Image (cartoon, coloured by chain):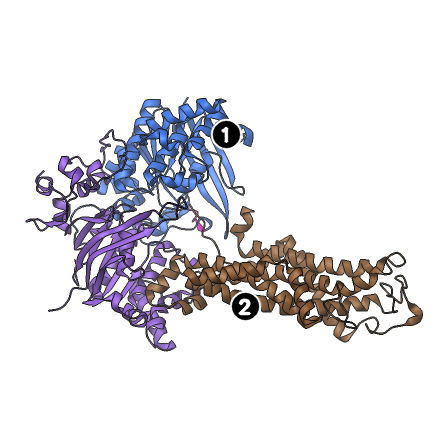
Amino acid sequence: MPLLEVENLTVTLATNRGPGDAVRNVAFALDRGETLGLVGESGCGKSITALALMSLLPERARIAGSIRLDGRELTTLGEDQLCGLRGDRMAMIFQEPMTSLNPVQTIGRQVAEPLILHKGMTRAAARERALDLLDRVGLPNPAARLDQFPHQLSGGQRQRVMIAMALACDPDLLIADEPTTALDVTIQGQILDLILDLVEERGMALLLISHDLGVIAETTQRMMVMYGGSVVEAGPTAEVFARMAHPYTRGLFAARPKLGPATETPLATIAGVVPELADLPPGCPFANRCPLMIPPCNDGLPPPLPMGPDHISRCIRARELVASA
Amino acid sequence: MSAALVEAERLRKVYALPRERLTAPAPQVVAVDGVSFTLQAGRSLAVVGESGSGKSTLARLVMALEPPTAGRILQSGRDLAALSPGELRRARADFQMVFQDPYGSLDPRRTVGWTIAEPLSALTDAGRAEQRERVAEMLAQVGLRAADAEKYPHEFSGGQRQRIAIARALITRPKLIVADEPVSALDVSVQAQVLNLMRELEARFGVTYLLISHDLAVVNYVAAEIAVMYRGRIVEQAPTRALFDRPAHPYTRALLEAVPKPEPGRTRRRRARAEPAGEIGTGCSFAPRCPFAIDRCRVEAPSLRKLETGHAAACHRAEEVIAG
Amino acid sequence: MTVAATPSAAPGFAARALRHPSFVAGAVLTGLIVLMALVSYVWTPHPPLEMTVSQRLKPPSEAWWLGTDAFGRDVASLIMAGARNSILVGVVAVGIGMTAGVAFGLYASAKRGWTEEIVMRLSDFVFAFPAILSAVMLTALAGAGTANSIIAIGIFNVPVFARITRAAANSVWAREFVLAARAAGKGGFRITVEHVLPNIVSILVVQATIQFAIAILAEAALSYLGLGTRPPDPSWGRMLNEAQAHIFRSPTLAVFPGIAIALSVLGLNLLGDGLRDLIDPRLARKR
């Protein structure tokens, strides 16, 4: 039995323009030691998926489907039981380490808090353990940092503290939502290295959310591409990059500014904008921006088409697309 | 002899932080530390660096939004600091700015047309009708409809808002547009649209960009030349191609290597590294992170020097870095 | 993922307002008081100043809805006419305080540095005196009367508005669109008028409703002390004062003006709270 099993997850949010499905029929499984990437643009539902896994959705969100952690259904659990799981069995790292840390508490106290809360450690023991954790995440001079406040640290150092907090109770599942987006490339590399090392060392499952195809390519074993709330392509990362069986994946890849001497040709673009949740078409969410659109695309959400071992694409023309390239 | 579009001479900007103790002097941060560069018309320059490297401060200094602590900025040979406030305001018709956050940089209570016309109404005595006409023309140039002038910013997506910001910057037909992270808040597919637009407008209006970015991949679509900043200083400046082909500073090299590349089957080359403690004495500020560092680097700060290859680099071992 | 914040001007403001209980309650109460004041100009059950000596201190009845006072005046009519006085004092005093305070606040925020320090320390100085105490001092010096009490309450309002304006304006000045306006070549005055003020108006409106309530209370207190509105002009505060002498024989005499003051203050506060929630939904959720 896999550690995390998500089936038919649908999250409906109240927006200014009426209810909209931020996540539609998402299903995946994730086991210990596995790394899964979730890639997409803002508004595609990737962060809402993560919040749904943590049961941290906004109050007015409605959730349907099933999320099981070690066989235990999470969607029906009460807040008290969820509090026992969050931070203990599953932990999350957020994008902005400045706003996710409490500015008026010392680093040491914030890292020690989950230990006192979940493991019933004494204050002294928790502080001792916090020191070990800060040392493990590579924070320079950890003993001195224990009594410092978040503003005294750099962005990369704060993200290391966030990671230490997330790791405090040895969670089984680590969700990292754009953990390096606010950081610089050189620091980004270090943080991703650290996360991968820790996942390996502790046999955690990692769900890494990013808008950056490069980060996903270098960090994850399997990946899912989300658009308009649905997973439009999923599979082993290498297979997805090798085939790119969905026009959106291709568009995203082509639009990415590439390193190297400038070329005279303009960057490829994806026409149009990400649709608003409340206006999602009944058919393929990408249809109105898609160069391959044909009338049947609007007939309903395309079914997942097998493209290879464990590789699916929700595009009715996926086979042609792969064959043409 | 025509003067360069922008000449920055030994710019320095120091900010005072709030005092930690009443008796101690207020701590200071040197955001920009002796930066000099020349920007020629038609050769857009990108300034690249990590957050806190002083690149945004540099943009504000060039825009004369803040006075430098030391050094001076000449625009087309004119010293901005020597102008009276009125003259400086009028001079702004020649240099305009695009900001990073397309949500924060447009007043939510003003229509798009009003916002785009803002530099005109501030700097010229163009009448209503002329303003409307110019706004419509600008909207068309950035790929929006004339009717959009009546709408409010919240009716637009991030990419469209950035187009509006670009239209505002272009309306006075400036010679220089300082763009501070113009696409970093945008989604990948939209980034490409805005970058292409910037390139088109460069050709069509003969505008030159000073582009500020943390992302090397973004700037090579717009910039003819790149300056890399690290901790308030320019550590390398070179024509775009030369910089990508043969970086002359170890930091540039680290930047290029660190960019994740979406290629199948590529996995991270993991380096077990802790973040450096960051205390720099008199030496090179990059030395604690530098694989090329030698003893000399820790005591003597290198200054920016011209290399035979057309690079300028602030590194004692630049020749070896280029070679290897 | 973020859902873009909608500014207050977005459609649906009216619809949201109607669903907001405290806004509706506040608007209804405030509306009733204003209506009462307006109606009193053309009609009251009895002429408010008419004394019917034979009918002194009557309990509420069909002829005298809320009874009569010690001079045989109709309490209901006096309360209706007294609303005019309360509203007049509120509007003018808040108007004075708001005009001067907002001007000081905007000026301080635009200039920063020493100017800001001086303006704000001056306003702290005025603020340091309790409102009623300074009003008492002023009216004691300049003489009692509606005009003087209005000025006294108005002066007390100046630092309140100066502070809130400066704080709100500073946060607008820190926004990127102001920097963009500077980069576009706009000067401090035009930025203040065209960008800063429109973006803080909603905060000022909310504060004005709350200050209005405070002004009504202050006027009542001053009149009660005999320092406010002078006889024979009807005033809720003075009605309370006059009721004092007959509190045991005719307790309703104190109750009705008391209720009028309480309801108008409650109404304005509810209205202010409701407006705050409606104008800035994000603030409402945080509370």
Residue at image location 72% in from the left, 67% down from the top = C228
Read off the residue under disc 1: A74
- Residue density around tag 1, few if under 14, some if 14–19, many if 20 or more, within 10 Å: some
Read off the residue under disc 2: C100
- Residue density around tag 2, few if under 14, some if 14–19, many if 20 or more, within 10 Å: some
Vertically, is C150 above or below A10?
below
Relative to the observer, which residue lies in front, C278 or C233?
Answer: C233
* Observer able to see residue A269: no
Q: Which amino acid does label 1 sit on?
A: Leu
Q: Main secondary structure of the magenta part?
A: loop
Q: Chain C is drawn in which colour?
A: brown
- Spot the purple chain and give its letter: B
- Mark 2–mark 1 Cα distance, whole angstroms, equals 58 Å
Q: Is residue C154 left or right of residue B208?
A: right
Residue at image location 42% in from the left, 64% down from the top = C111
Relative to the observer, which residue lies in front, A14 or B94?
Answer: B94
Q: What element carries label 1?
A: loop
- Spot the blue chain and give its letter: A
Single out the mark in the foreground, 2 or 1. Answer: 2
Q: Is residue C69 left or right of residue B229?
A: right
Look at the image and give the residue range highlighted in magenta: A279-283
The image quadrant of residue C92 is: bottom right
